[in-house]
Amino acid sequence: MNDSNDKKMTDKKADSTRNKVVKSPEKTPSSSDNEFLCPCRKYIGGEFSVGCDQCEKFWHYGCVGLKGLTEEMGRLLENWLCPDCFKSPHSYKESDNEENKALRVIIKEELQLFAPKLTNSLNNVINSSTEKTVNKAVHLYSEVTAKSQKKVIEDLSTAQASENVISKVQTKMHTDAYERNLRKLNLCVLKVPESKKDTSKQRQEEDAKFCLETLKIEKKDFISCHRAGKPDPEKSDYCRSLIIKTADEESVNYYSNHGKGWKESSYWINLDLCRADREIRFLARKERKKRLEGAPKKNVSNNP
């Protein structure tokens, strides 16, 4: 009798293995094939389907990630569970069945009953130390606010100072550019004795004569001349700079030796520079003099 039972179990296992994998017929499925139809409810001709060992539903290889397996490989699967029956030990998502729904309803009702009591308990605990906590928070907030305000004020002061500096620099640059444009056709001669004539017209005529005769400036290149600044009655021997306006930039470059200066009858003819350009040239000369003083002197040997 035991042999008979073993034979029946073996035959049952063999039938289960044989029916583990089925192949869709190469035709439109009939009503008799519905038991092997995949839950996707799509008919795929010639596609293999594998049966679940728990719910006995058949699934297409492609629907459960087994695409590429042969029929023989599918028959070797043991205790295969479909996505509906399989529960991963690493998954925290509960299946949405009636038992779980009822359990969630019970838990929700219990929480609704327990929530007011919990709220009252928390309020009692909080109220006992609320005043101290609030006072401490206000104190800390006031300190942080004071520090933040101080930092903001410092940053604003720095930003405002930077804006003032930038504004002053921009104004200075515009002023220098304007002065350069006014002086670009001018020449400047220093230490020229001023005329003692009574009227300004007579004194200007004397200066023009000096430019044409003493400085050898040709009449076609000469436009006008004037003295820079106002006379100082306290300094009788002080001579204001003589500013000469020429016809064009070519004349300026010629008579000033292209900005290097030209000496004529013991008088130096230079460009009429604005204050910024004068300071730049002064610093350049100062640096050059410093380098020359620091350079080692060359020994000059007289050959017999």
Image (cartoon, rainbow, N blue to C red):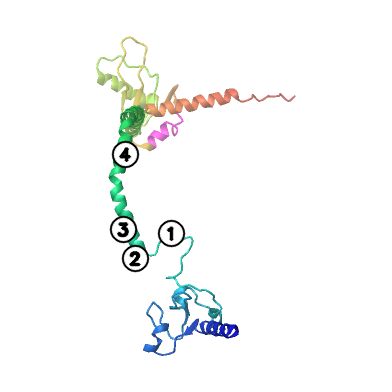
Crowding near the residue tagged with mark 2, few <14, some 14–19, many ≥20 C-alpha atoms within 10 Å:
few
Callouts 2 and 3 close, C-beta under 8 Å: no
Q: Which mark is in front, 1 or 4?
A: 4
CB contact under 8 Å: marks 3 and 1: no
**Residue 168, percent from left and from top:** 33, 29
| Magenta span | 250-262
Residue shown at the point (38%, 81%) measured from the top left = 42
63 and 169: which one is in front? 63
Say which of 165 and 233 sits in front.
Answer: 165
Is 85 magenta? The answer is no
121 shown above or below 285: below
- Graded by Cα atoms within 10 Å as few (under 14), some (14 to 19) or many (20 or more), the crowding at tag 1 reads few
Vertical placement of 31 versus 140: above or below?
below
Query: Does dot 2 land on a helix, a strand or a loop?
Result: helix
Judged left or right of residue 212, residue 68 is right
Residue identifier under label 2: 98
Query: How many angstroms separate mark 3 from mark 1 (CA)?
Result: 19 Å
What residue does disc 1 label?
Answer: 92
Labelled pair 4, 2 in contact (Cβ < 8 Å): no
Q: Is residue 153 visible?
A: no
Q: Amino acid at mark 4?
A: Ser
Q: Which mark is residue 39?
A: none
Sequence order check, earlier mark of 2 and 3: 2
**How far separated are the C-alphas under marks 2 and 3?**
11 Å
Marks 1 and 4 sit apart, C-alpha to C-alpha, by: 32 Å
Question: As shown in the figure, which amino acid type bears the numbered disc 3?
Answer: Val
Residue under label 3, please give it.
105
Q: From the image, state whether disc 3 or disc 1 is nearer to you.
A: 3
- Say if residue 279 shows up in the picture: yes
Residue in view at x 48 percent, y 76 percent:
53
Q: Which residue is mark 4?
A: 121
Disc 2 marks a residue whose amino acid type is Glu
